[in-house]
Image (tube, grey):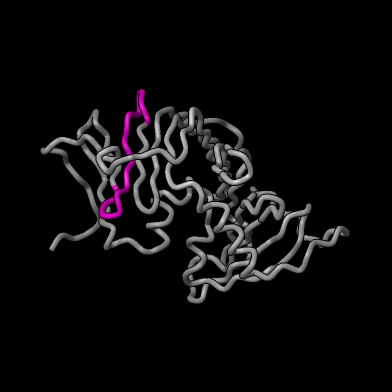
Amino acid sequence: MRITGFNHCLEAEELPDYSAEYIISRINETYSKVFSAQGRITRTIEVDNTEIQRHNGRFAVKKPEHIITEFVGEYHQYVGFDGKNFRIYFPNENKGILQKNSDMSHLERYILGPEPFFGNIITLLKQGFSIKVADRVDGNIILKATPHKPVNFNFILVSVDPKTWSIKAIEHFDRKNNLVSQTKFLEYKTVGDSLFFPTKTETSNIIRDTVRVETTNLTRIQLNITLDDESFSIPFKNNTEWISNIEEE
């Protein structure tokens, strides 16, 4: 199984010779204008073009560290991160998974935190990666981010639209330079020319020779509203059984 990546060839149409530093500054400027969001969420999972799961619920996110989603129905669950703990709670069983922030890597905190909802991977790549302009494809600029220290992938490619300075897609390549993960930002909620918030994303991963596609649709979205920290509390019980791979002191 394969994931179809960017068509990596230089376009006949020339784009201005932007530096990586300039592009990064424009991307951060675009995404800095949205600091909170809430609404409805639908997440579907397909394996080899067959839908195996569909979950509906609500979400709320607030920079820099708060996020909560609640999926209702047969698989009722809460997923939350408050900068101190990451939790997945299953109220029907009164059980959950707990991971402490202090025991998580920077990459884990990024993936589990609110930033993926806002769509700006540059906030992660600013630390520990070398970034350069690698290509120009279909009118977009391709940034290549290479980690300073060895990790489980060789590099990341980021497709950037220079008209809006928004991120269109992200690709991860493994140690053998094979494309193993791709995220596409398909739709945005925009307010004038200044606010960009991704409302439909599609992430494809190759897992044991199968392609797993996770699509997230966000609706009824409110941007830049006031959300207090209590909005992100998970209503677990005092006798909830928490499972963790962290050894308590």
Find the magenta span and give its range.
71-86
131 in magenta: no
In the image, what residue occupies the spot 53% across and 61% down?
Answer: 122
In the image, what residue occupies the spot 20% across and 34% down?
Answer: 94
Residue 230, x across and y down, in percent: 25, 40
Q: Identify whether 19 is placed above or below 138.
A: below
Residue 15, x across and y down, in percent: 80, 61
Residue 105, x across and y down, in percent: 36, 64
| Closer to the camera in the image, 183 or 24 | 24
Quarter of the image where one finds residue 210: top right
Residue 40, x across and y down, in percent: 45, 29
Q: Can residue 210 be seen in this view?
A: no
In the image, what residue occupies the spot 53% across and 49% down?
Answer: 119
Is residue 128 found left or right of 189 in the rendered image? left
In the image, what residue occupies the spot 42% across and 61% down?
Answer: 107
81 in magenta: yes
Q: Quadrant of the C terminus?
A: bottom left
Is residue 92 found left or right of 173 in the rendered image? left
Is residue 21 found left or right of 246 in the rendered image? right
Q: Which residue, as the protein is rendered here, is positioned at the far bottom?
A: 148
Q: Identify whether 81 is placed above or below 39.
A: below
| Closer to the camera in the image, 28 or 41 | 28
Quarter of the image where one finds residue 16: bottom right
| Closer to the camera in the image, 203 or 144 | 144
Q: Is residue 223 visible?
A: yes
Q: Which residue, as the protein is rendered here, is positioned at the far top?
A: 73
Quarter of the image where one finds residue 47: top right
Q: Identify whether 45 is placed above or below 17.
A: above
Is residue 233 found left or right of 240 in the rendered image? right
The number of callouts visible is: 0
Q: Identify whether 196 is placed above or below 143.
A: above
